[in-house]
């Protein structure tokens, strides 16, 4: 049975980790390495946002309507200060500026395939795909806000540092990050 985003969002009884991908319901139960890296990434982004005013909002998974048949739950996301939702808002309007997806065996094919393409088409400025198996992060970003698609692609591994033009002063050391 295929669903629309409206039909999917109208239900509140989905198990945690459920997403709508091209109209199909996908359920994921993350493993421990996934959750450890999600927590570590969120903690680093949260610390950076709270270190100075005006650095936006970092958050854990919430339903994000990407298209009429796609509702994703990015593991970690960030929006700039100008897009920070008010405290009483129940969901994010539009897509985040930065999305982080951490590899799970049941969903990685979606993350590197259709979800990457849909995030790009929807206007996500930067996407980090954290590969728990390879201890690497695939980074897709736009070189400028008006760029229509991801024109920068990087693979960062141990020994590298992840920085972002979106996050002035933020750095993620790959050796420390992948230390499980």
Image (cartoon, rainbow, N blue to C red):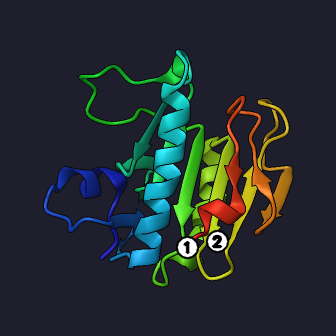
Which residue lies under the disc numbered 1? 110
Whether residues under marks 2 and 1 lie with C-beta atoms below 8 angstroms apart, the answer is yes
What x and y, as percent, mark residue 4? 35, 58
Using residue 133 as the reference point, say whether residue 30 is left or right of it: left
Res 161 label: none
For the view shown, which residue lies furthest in the left direction?
A: 13
* Between 30 and 123, the one nearer to me in the picture: 30
* Between 73 and 176, the one nearer to me in the picture: 176
Residue 34 seen in the current view: yes
What x and y, as percent, mark residue 81? 53, 20
Query: Label 2's element?
Result: helix
Q: Is residue 79 above or below residue 3?
A: above
Residue occupying the point 21% across, 68% down: 15
Residue occupying the point 39% across, 48% down: 60
Residue occupying the point 60% across, 43% down: 98
What x and y, as percent, mark residue 40? 49, 56
User: Residue 97's quadrant in the figure?
Assistant: top right
* Between 124 and 52, the one nearer to me in the picture: 52
């Amino acid at each position: 049975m295929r669903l629309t985003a409206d039909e999917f969002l109208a239900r509140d009884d989905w198990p945690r980790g459920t997403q709508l991908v091209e109209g199909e319901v996908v359920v994921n139960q993350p493993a421990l390495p996934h959750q450890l890296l999600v927590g570590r990434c969120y903690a680093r982004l949260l610390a950076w946002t709270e270190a100075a005013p005006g650095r936006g909002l970092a958050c854990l998974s919430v339903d994000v309507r990407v298209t009429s048949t796609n509702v994703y739950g990015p593991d970690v996301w960030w929006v700039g200060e100008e897009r920070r939702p008010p405290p009483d808002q129940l969901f994010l309007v539009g897509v985040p500026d930065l999305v982080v997806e951490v590899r799970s065996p049941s969903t990685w094919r979606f993350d590197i395939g259709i979800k990457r393409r849909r995030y790009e088409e929807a206007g996500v400025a930067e996407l980090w795909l954290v590969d728990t198996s390879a201890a690497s992060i695939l980074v897709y970003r736009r070189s400028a806000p008006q760029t229509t698609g991801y024109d920068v692609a990087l693979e960062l591994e141990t020994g590298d540092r992840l920085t972002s033009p979106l996050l002035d002063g933020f750095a993620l050391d790959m050796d420390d990050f992948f230390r499980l």
